[in-house]
Image (tube, grey):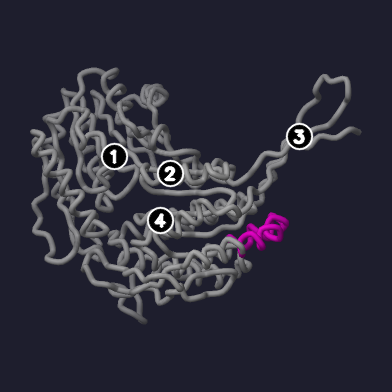
Amino acid sequence: MTSTQTDLRTWVPATRELLIDGRLVPGAGPTIEAVNPATEQVTATVPTATLEQVDQAVAAARRAFPAWAATSPRERSAAIHRLADVFEKHSERLTASIVNEVGTPAAFAEVMQVKLGVTHLRWQAEAALVDRTVQLGEWHDPVLTHSEVAYRPVGVVACITGYNYPINLAVFKFGAALAAGCTAVLLPSPRTPLTTLWMGELFEEAGIPAGVLNVVIGDGPSVGQRLTTHPWVDRVSFTGSDAVGARIMEQAARDLKGVTLELGGKSPTILLPGVDAAALARDVHLRWARNGGQGCAALARMLVHESLVDEFLAASGEAFGALRVGDPWDREVNIGPMIREDHRARVQGFIDGALADGGEIVLSLDTPLPEKGYFVNPVVFAGLPHDNRLVQQEVFGPVGVLVPFATEDEAIRLANESDYGLAANIFTPDVEHGRRLAARLQSGTVWINGGGNMRPDAPFGGFKKSGVGREIGEWGIREYLEAQHVQWRP
């Protein structure tokens, strides 16, 4: 990554203004600080929105909705493609913004945030062209009628995103909403406001009509609650913790508005007899430790057949040497900092608690950490009962747990003994057997032998406390559509 105009290591977007009805306006609420978690440096002071400005953003989306819903699919598709073009044009700085605001390692941010976000926008642009109308067949009825089922946009969507993937989480929501014919108000985590504020400027550059996309900033108890309870918001889409998701569902229920919730996870990797545990060790650990473990689908529960435990641990010693913690601009680093000091302390609290509960550290990386930054070295525990806090709760940090099992049935039982059901990974020498086992797992996504990258045409979401509804693909777009039965006599 190169730039002749600026030092990307310190670059942050200059935009500090909200986007309301096609205009960039200063926030009139209290200020919040944007902090680089790798350096602890305050990079910007950002004014938040007042409740009145939230109302203005929702009103703008409400006014813009009829015209956007009536816009031809081809025009909506072209607008989303233009937005993808703008993201590609600014991809270098979008990557820099993510690295400097979230602490995501640069190589990971470039591929899994910016490029993947553009890929999803392109798919959503094409999905806007799909005619979803279903013609119903003949029905035996005394009165002969014709019927079809059409899909209509639900209206105004509140898109509330988490801090860990500011681009992807936003694109999954507003891209699908726009493709469906909805308008939106976007609210990012107050811990990572800068990238999303800059998106407001990019929406303008792409020529998105005024009011179709709006951006506000603020905390959950004030700005967030105003959005989720606003009578002119027709659907709420939220990514974050299950505790906050439950509160949002309660708030939205007051007006019986629909919700899409992508929440937490405590996802398992299952290593079955017959696999090469030594060859798989590095991939297994990267999947839960990368991005500092700050991923809802992090595969942090490693269920390993008892015959493979020794081999797996021996190979994992070398695999841990491939984990690099530190400066996220170092292209060899794959574990950046925690987002803030309070979160670093929370992760450390899980480690201390597991030790106090008699857990044994079986793998650890003892890299000297930078003097500045909210870094945590990755660690793996064993010897904890399956109902232990570390085994059951989402850490959102580079802390894994190893759980041996004796039989396949035990592995499936342990994998399902969780409040969550977001993702799972099965390593097996027999793929078809792995597919049969997938049917027994309560997980929204099941990878077999590592699977592949996140597809823009496949659903993402979970069972149980991992969420409600699905994002991405046709399933994600259907979250923003209502089925309408139209029936007529000849």
Most common secondary structure along the magenta stretch:
helix
Task: Identify the residue at horizontal 30%, vertical 43% (top origin).
Answer: 298
> Looking at the rendering, in which quadrant would you find the N terminus?
bottom left
Q: Is 363 in front, or is 43?
A: 43
Kind of residue at badge 4: Gly
Q: Which residues are magenta?
A: 60-81
**Disc 3 designates what residue?**
135
Q: Give residue 262's mark.
A: 2
Q: Earlier in the sequence, mark 1 or mark 3?
A: 3
**Disc 1 designates what residue?**
299
Task: Identify the residue at horizontal 62%, vertical 50% (top origin).
Answer: 180
Describe residue 451's horizontal placement relative to residue 83 as left or right: left
Crowd band around label 3 with a 10 angstrom C-alpha radius: few (<14), some (14–19), many (20+): few
Q: Earlier in the sequence, mark 2 or mark 3?
A: 3
Kind of residue at badge 1: Leu
Crowd band around label 4 with a 10 angstrom C-alpha radius: few (<14), some (14–19), many (20+): some
Q: Is 334 in front, or is 163?
A: 163
Crowd band around label 2 with a 10 angstrom C-alpha radius: few (<14), some (14–19), many (20+): many
**Disc 4 designates what residue?**
220
Q: Give residue 209's mark.
A: none
Front position among marks 1 and 4 = 4
Q: Is residue 461 magenta?
A: no
Q: Secondary structure at mark 4?
A: helix
User: Splitting the image into 4 quarters, where does residue 363 fall?
Assistant: top left
Q: Earlier in the sequence, mark 3 or mark 4?
A: 3
Q: Earlier in the sequence, mark 2 or mark 1?
A: 2
